[in-house]
Amino acid sequence: MAQYRGRFAPSATGPLHLGSILAALVSYIHAKHHHGDWLIRIDDLDRKRCNQIHVDSILDCLDAFGFSPSASVCRQTDRISDYQNALSSLEEQGRLYPCSCTRKSLPKGPYPGFCRNQIGQTLIADRAVRIDASDIDLMVDDLITTSSISQPSGDFIVKRRDGFFAYQLACAVDERIDGITHVIRGIDLLDSTPMQRFIMKCLGYESPTYGHFPVLVGADGTKLSKQTFAEPVDWTRPGATFALISRLLLLKDTPGPNEHAQVWLDYFISLENFIPLIVKASEANTLSI
Ligand code: GLU
């Protein structure tokens, strides 16, 4: 059996907030409970939204919180040729097509297939590239959630019109390159999983095991995110952030807010039922700030 390899893959679009630290923590604890490796991958493909300042702040912050990866940090921008090879192989299979639809011209919901008659046609530089996903499998066995995906994607984009590889393609290729066996991430990414597994299947890769955990929500009930300007965590006081997380998880007898990050991580690792605790907190609506 492959050794456990998990990962945390933040996008370099802003500093880490409480929800990101919870995501790092859940994937980290899961890996530690399985005596596995845990990697950090920086998702920085979108050069309009990502920059080096965010990369540095994310890595400094993870370091201050005691999250040390088992191998050197990798970045998606170092893997463009791998994504290109994957795209070429999908193209050779006749699964891709150029798409000239603009976001504005499309109704909400699955892609209605306006450009499907282009399947197998030559890809064009300034057009998005979609993949024929008619035989995608929407069922995912999940280690944590019993929810099913909220909406199928239809034929989805694997390369954007602006030339950037899409997250779905890049992430599928990354899991393969890094030998990831377990993807433990927030439930907000559940709808992405069938797309990523579909690409893996087309490319003949083995799929990792997935687990999607409940995410932290703000007062308005939506996920805390960099897009909604969730406050960055204070990485000079990791104990205070871990203490807040432990309050949201209704934990008692925890280390104090001034304790060192490693003391907190050891404490979280000592909780054998860490993942069920998060599910319980979410059901009790305490995973909100
Ligand atoms: N970088 C993406 C995000 O932060 C994807 C993460 C993942 O696949 O775990 O939402």
Image: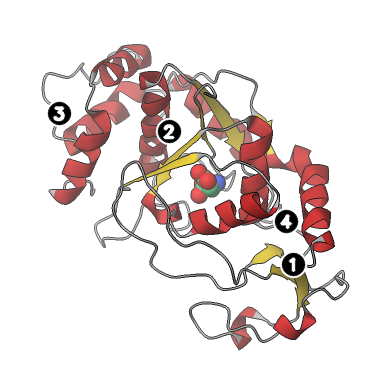
Numbered label attached to residue 165:
4
Residue 118 seen in render: yes
CA–CA distance in space, label 4 to label 3? 41 Å
Residue in view at x 46 percent, y 60 percent: 191
Q: Are marks 4 and 2 in contact (CB under 8 Å)?
A: no
Which amino acid type corresponds to the residue marked 3 in the rendered image? Leu
Mark 4 or 3, nearer chain start: 4
Mark 1 or 3, nearer chain start: 1
Residue 270: where, in percent of width, then height?
25, 16
At numbered mark 1, what does the secondary structure look like: helix, strand or loop? loop
Residue 234: where, in percent of width, then height?
39, 31
At numbered mark 3, what does the secondary structure look like: helix, strand or loop? loop
**Mark 1 = which residue?**
95
Which amino acid type corresponds to the residue marked 4 in the rendered image? Phe
**Mark 3 = which residue?**
251
**Mark 2 = which residue?**
24
Q: Are marks 4 and 3 in contact (CB under 8 Å)?
A: no
At numbered mark 2, what does the secondary structure look like: helix, strand or loop? helix
Mark 1 or 2, nearer chain start: 2
Residue 84: where, in percent of width, then height?
82, 51
